[in-house]
Image: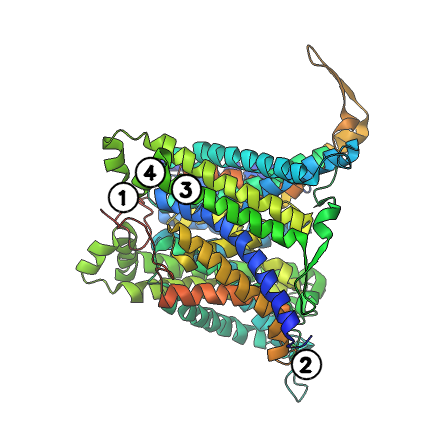
């Protein structure tokens, strides 16, 4: 490994892919934080559920032999929509069961409940997969077209799947932007985030809007799960913990409650992590290698919270007591 | 007259359950019933002296006696003791002050590694002279050093992050614990500090300084039989110290300041409570308890590796505190006992039972449902592997139906459980 420009570009590309993945997950944290002011700790499991739905469909298609006959673009679209639908519904159900009964309780109570839900869902996925497949470590079947490399010059070869992640993420972000800013439902979400009491007085069904927020955030997480599976191929029920924590860091980095902030935070964190993974070893003469990339990410989180607790773009959360 | 009745009843119950424990080796239910006598003593309308003597009889006489006859029970008792101590430490931070610390296990790890590194050959890997392992007597010095190290790391972590909003604090402490675990896991190079994932062994145990006395009294026990009892009493003494400190703190101006911060931080500031100092103190006290327990844990296990200090453990201890009731000392004790037994014994017992069913070849025929071959129970379905699910359920159900826990604090009114910086109103 050295400092050649080609490798540097490769590393940047990895960072961008990782960053978009984090951004998609971070949206779920940040949107829920916007309306309810609490960390949906179980969001990382919603992400994992998306990844497992994708894996199950793909494995099902493979074993039935249909995978070879279907157009890969169609397969990927089916995976994405299924992952989004199931994860979105799971997030809604979670809100209904574990968080709604706690509305109005002191702040720590729903957070603790969310931690419980996170633990419960991890083992729930494990149980379902164990009963169904007798194993809970799944491998995504490879879609040949995604493994093809695209040459970017200077010896940089980027697999198509990286572009898939970036393109899908961009499309979803655009869709979310339009939804939140240009539709009535999006306006309702923003109104609830600003002031739930006033929103209720204006005739907005606050509980339903909160459900909707969970659905949208969950769907983004589910899509990220499918992309994660397609890109890194190995998943297990506990795969969500790391990406979830990083995505939360990304949301805080950008300014929690702030949708563009989550995207920016995700990209910054993804790039920093990729750079750290590749260059920490070189910079420290092999003393500290890629295994410290997580330490690096947490160090970033702690530093941001100390020096810029409102994040890069400032948080959009209503003032306390307001 | 009434007192006499209660005394006799309690003594009868204790005797009966001891007999049960004695006659059923490795029985969780018998042991739970026996442990429940402590709860009965706590609630019985008796004088302080009577309560104390009953507790002493159970913990100092009966438990070691039963434990000597069946080492399994002693092992369980020691594990429970360790978790009770951890839960009491976390209870100060979460229960008294209302700061959610999701990385409590980090302090435990720091204590454990402190003694593991210097109480084994490990320190020779980076310090010249070959002085290590240190002598057994150093264990007691390191118990104190552990307390200091815990307090110091607690303060170092607390200084920058205690100003944060409550939910940020939770994530930062979680991140801190992951950093500590990553360091412990990876610091086998460039300098071999922790021996990485392979762990450290053998670790020195505390000295049997009383052996001459025991032999003088006419017993001829070997070290293997003596050590479990020794650790049992060490844990008991440590617990006693922790409970005393916690109780004194709870009823002191410091404890009242802590609760004031928990109930309403803004009001506490207005009343002149030095909020940052008080939070730091709570962090330091909780961390020092955990680190001291860590030193003891390392000495007891003789072998430690990073696996013992995962996020899972932090959540387990949190579940204990929540189950018992945040801010309540008896609650933390109850929660730790129940969760430890559940985790160590009940789930494993259930797994064994299901295994037995599977192999029994019995075919159940249920009306309406048809027949069901018990050997068809999937082999993956092992309750012992699903502790996260159990913890998760406990936590969610407690938060929805009984957020104050099973033994909420008796005095001081409501536990509002607010986080720092929040007035609880919205």
* Residue A153 occupies quadrant: bottom right
Helix, strand or loop status at disc 2: helix
The subunit letter for the residue under badge 3 reads A
Helix, strand or loop status at disc 3: helix
Residue where numbered disc 3 is placed: A178
B54 or A29, nearer to the observer: A29
| Depicted B199 relative to depicted A57: above or below | below
| Depicted B190 relative to depicted B395: above or below | below
Residue where numbered disc 2 is placed: B125
User: How far is the residue under mark 2 from the one under mark 4?
Assistant: 63 Å
Q: Are marks 1 and 3 in contact (CB under 8 Å)?
A: no
User: How far is the residue under mark 1 from the one under mark 4?
Assistant: 42 Å
Residue B413's mark? 1
The mark closer to the camera, 2 or 3, is: 3
Q: Give the image location of residue A48, x and y in percent.
A: 59, 44
The mark closer to the camera, 1 or 4, is: 4
């Amino acid at each position: 490994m050295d400092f050649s420009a080609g490798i540097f570009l490769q590393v940047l590309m990895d960072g961008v892919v990782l960053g978009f993945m984090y951004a998609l997950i971070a949206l779920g944290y940040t949107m829920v934080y916007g309306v309810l002011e609490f960390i949906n700790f179980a969001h990382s499991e919603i992400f994992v559920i998306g990844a497992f739905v994708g894996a199950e469909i793909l494995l099902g298609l493979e074993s039935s032999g249909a995978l070879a006959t279907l157009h890969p673009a169609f397969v990927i679209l089916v995976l994405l929509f299924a992952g989004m639908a199931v994860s979105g519904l799971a997030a809604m159900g979670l809100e209904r069961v574990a968080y709604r009964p706690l509305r109005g309780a002191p702040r720590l109570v729903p957070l603790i409940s969310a931690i419980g839900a996170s633990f419960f869902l991890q083992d729930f996925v494990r149980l379902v997969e164990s009963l169904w497949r007798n194993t809970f470590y799944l491998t995504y079947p490879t879609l040949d077209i995604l493994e093809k490399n695209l040459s970017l010059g200077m010896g940089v070869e980027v697999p198509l799947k990286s572009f898939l992640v970036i393109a899908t993420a961009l499309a979803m972000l655009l869709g979310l932007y339009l939804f939140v800013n240009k539709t009535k439902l999006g306006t309702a979400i923003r109104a609830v985030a600003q002031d739930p009491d006033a929103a209720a007085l204006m005739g907005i069904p606050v509980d339903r809007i909160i459900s909707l927020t969970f659905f949208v955030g969950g769907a983004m997480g589910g899509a990220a799960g499918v992309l994660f599976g397609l890109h890194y191929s190995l998943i297990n029920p506990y795969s969500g913990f790391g990406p979830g924590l990083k995505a939360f860091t990304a949301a805080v980095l950008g300014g929690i409650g702030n949708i563009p902030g989550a995207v920016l935070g995700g990209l910054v964190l993804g790039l920093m992590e990729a750079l750290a993974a590749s260059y920490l070893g070189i910079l420290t003469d092999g003393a500290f290698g890629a295994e410290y990339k997580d330490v690096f990410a947490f160090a970033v989180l702690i530093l941001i919270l100390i020096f810029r607790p409102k994040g890069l773009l400032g948080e959009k959360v209503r003032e306390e007591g307001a | 007259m009434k007192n006499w009745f209660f005394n006799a009843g309690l003594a009868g119950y204790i005797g009966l359950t001891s007999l049960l424990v004695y006659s059923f080796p490795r029985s969780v239910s018998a042991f739970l019933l026996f442990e429940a006598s402590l709860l009965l003593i706590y609630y019985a309308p008796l004088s302080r002296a009577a309560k104390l003597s009953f507790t002493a009889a159970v913990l100092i006489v009966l438990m070691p006696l039963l434990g000597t006859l069946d080492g399994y029970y002693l092992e369980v008792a020691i594990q429970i003791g360790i978790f009770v101590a951890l839960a009491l430490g976390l209870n100060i931070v979460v229960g008294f002050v209302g700061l959610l610390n999701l990385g409590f296990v980090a302090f435990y790890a720091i204590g454990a590694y402190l003694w593991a590194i210097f109480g084994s050959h490990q320190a020779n890997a980076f310090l010249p002279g070959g002085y290590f392992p240190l002598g057994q007597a150093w264990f007691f010095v390191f118990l104190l050093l552990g307390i200091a190290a815990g307090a110091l790391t607690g303060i170092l972590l607390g200084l920058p992050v205690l100003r944060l909003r409550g939910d940020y604090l939770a994530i930062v402490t979680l991140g801190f614990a992951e950093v500590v675990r990553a360091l412990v896991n990876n610091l086998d190079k460039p300098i071999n500090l922790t021996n990485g994932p392979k762990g450290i062994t053998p670790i020195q145990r505390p000295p049997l300084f009383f052996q001459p006395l025991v032999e003088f009294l006419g017993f001829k026990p070997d070290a293997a039989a003596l050590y479990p009892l020794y650790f049992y009493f060490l844990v008991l003494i440590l617990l006693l110290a922790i409970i005393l400190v916690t109780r004194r703190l709870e009823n002191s101006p410091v404890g009242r300041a802590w609760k004031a911060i928990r109930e309403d931080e803004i009001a506490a500031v207005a009343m002149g409570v030095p909020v940052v100092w008080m939070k730091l103190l709570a962090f330091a006290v909780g961390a020092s308890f955990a680190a001291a327990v860590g030193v003891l844990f390392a000495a007891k296990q003789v072998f430690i590796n990073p696996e013992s200090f995962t996020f899972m453990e932090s959540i387990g201890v949190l579940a204990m505190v929540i189950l018992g009731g945040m801010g309540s000392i008896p609650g933390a004790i109850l929660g730790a006992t129940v969760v430890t037994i559940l985790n160590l014994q009940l789930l494993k017992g259930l797994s064994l039972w299901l295994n037995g069913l599977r192999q029994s070849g019995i075919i159940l025929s249920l009306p309406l449902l048809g027949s069901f071959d018990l050997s068809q129970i999937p082999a993956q379905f092992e309750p012992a592997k699903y502790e996260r699910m159990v913890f998760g359920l406990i936590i969610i159900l407690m938060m929805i139906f009984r957020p104050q826990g099973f033994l909420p604090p008796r005095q001081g009114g409501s536990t509002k459980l607010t986080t720092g910086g929040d007035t609880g109103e919205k």
